[in-house]
Each structure stands twice: as C-alpha cells, then as structure tokens.
Amino acid sequence: MREPEATLPRTRVPEFPDIMDIEASGFGSHSYPIEIGVVLGEGRRFSRLIRPPTDWQHWDTAAEAVHGLSRELLTAHGQSPLAVAHALNALLAGRTLYSDGWVLDQPWLNRLYAAAQIRRTFHLSPLELLLTEPQMQIWASTRAEVEQELDLMRHRASQDARVIQTTFNRSLVACRQAAAR
C-alpha cells in the first residue's frame, strides 16, 4: 500500500509584495549602495540617498549614466549608512521584501549594514521565489508595458521598485485570468 503524498500548505502569494530596489556605484565586487527604494504592499514608499563613507571609493561612470546620481549629489544630499539602516529597520522590522536583482542587492544591503555596524531587522529574498512559471514567461513584456504606461523619466530605486511591484501584480492577474478560461 502506498503512503499518501505529503502536501505542503500553500503559501498565499501577495498581490502586492513588499519590493526593494538598490542603485549602486557600479556592478563589481567593490561597488556599494548609493540609493535604496522600497514600495510596500499597502502602497507606502521609502527612498533614501546614501552618502558614501570615505573608504567607499569605487565609482563607475557607466552606472552613473544609468541612475544619474553623482558622488557630489550623494555627498551633499545623502544620509549616512547608519541613518539609512536605522530608517529601514524602523520601517521594515519583521518583513520580507523581494528584489528582482537579489544577487546584487543582497551584497549591497550587507555592505550598508556592515558600514552602519547594526543588525538588519528584515529579510530580503529573490522575487523569483514568488513567481510562477507562467508569470516568468510574460514578465519581460508585462514590464515593458508597465514602464511605458508609467512613463518614468528617471531610473531611480523607488521608481524601479514601483515598476517591479506593478509588473508582479499585473502578471499575476493575467495568469489567473488565463487559468480561469
């Protein structure tokens, strides 16, 4: 007689997951976070520029061309890693946020908290953990539609987080509608 298959409880996928996006000084191992953007499931937004500590020296002009943030702007208007880390902890304690660039965003977030010398009170996970195969198949085209509709003029962390969250929602709804047919 066969044992019945164990089934895991199905985790409810939020329609509007908490999303984090990070802009950085470059893309290599010496790069560091310069802006953090968050859009929460209930719609609240968070954005902070980060003033690089003196030992964060790497700067990639190609990355600057994408995000449009200069070292001078960060020095003049950015907050210290400690101030940004405290603000993130206060807003996000106990939450799980998702990133579409987790492979890069996780090390940058770790670098921020190492510089701040405090413990992070939230978790960052890859967005792919929430995506279904059908969502993945329509992700690029859905994102292109969202970007065109939102017509954002700047490539910035909080706007990217909004695009990611909206794309997630729209692709989820489209897949549910297709499955119901």
Image (cartoon, grey):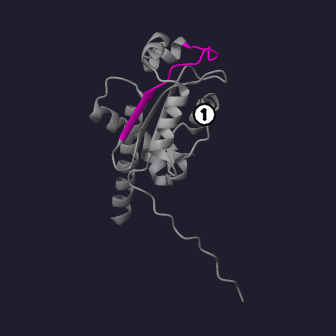
Picture quadrant of residue 109: top right
In the displayed structure, does residue 62 sit left or right of residue 170?
right
Q: Most prominent secondary structure in the magenta stretch?
A: loop
Quadrant position of the C terminus in the picture: bottom left
Looking at this view, name the residue that lies furthest to the right: 1
* Residue toward you, 156 or 109: 109
Q: Amino acid at mark 1?
A: Tyr
Residue at the image point whose x is 37% and y is 42% from the top: 142
Q: Residue at x 50, y 12 (%)?
A: 71
Q: Is residue 57 magenta?
A: yes
Q: Which residues are magenta?
A: 45-60
Q: Nearer the viewer, residue 67 or 147?
A: 67
- x and y, in percent, of residue 88 in the image: 48, 38
Seen in the picture, residue 45 relative to 50 is either above or below; the reply is below
Q: Quadrant of residue 110?
A: top right
Residue 136 screen position, x and y as percent: 48, 47
The residue lying toward the viewer, choosing from 167 and 137, is: 167
Q: Quadrant of residue 19?
A: top left
Q: Is 35 or 172 nearer to us in this picture?
A: 35
- Circle 1 is placed at which residue position? 113
Could you say where residue 12 lies in the image, as x and y percent from the top left? 46, 63
Q: Position of residue 99 (x, y in %)?
A: 51, 41
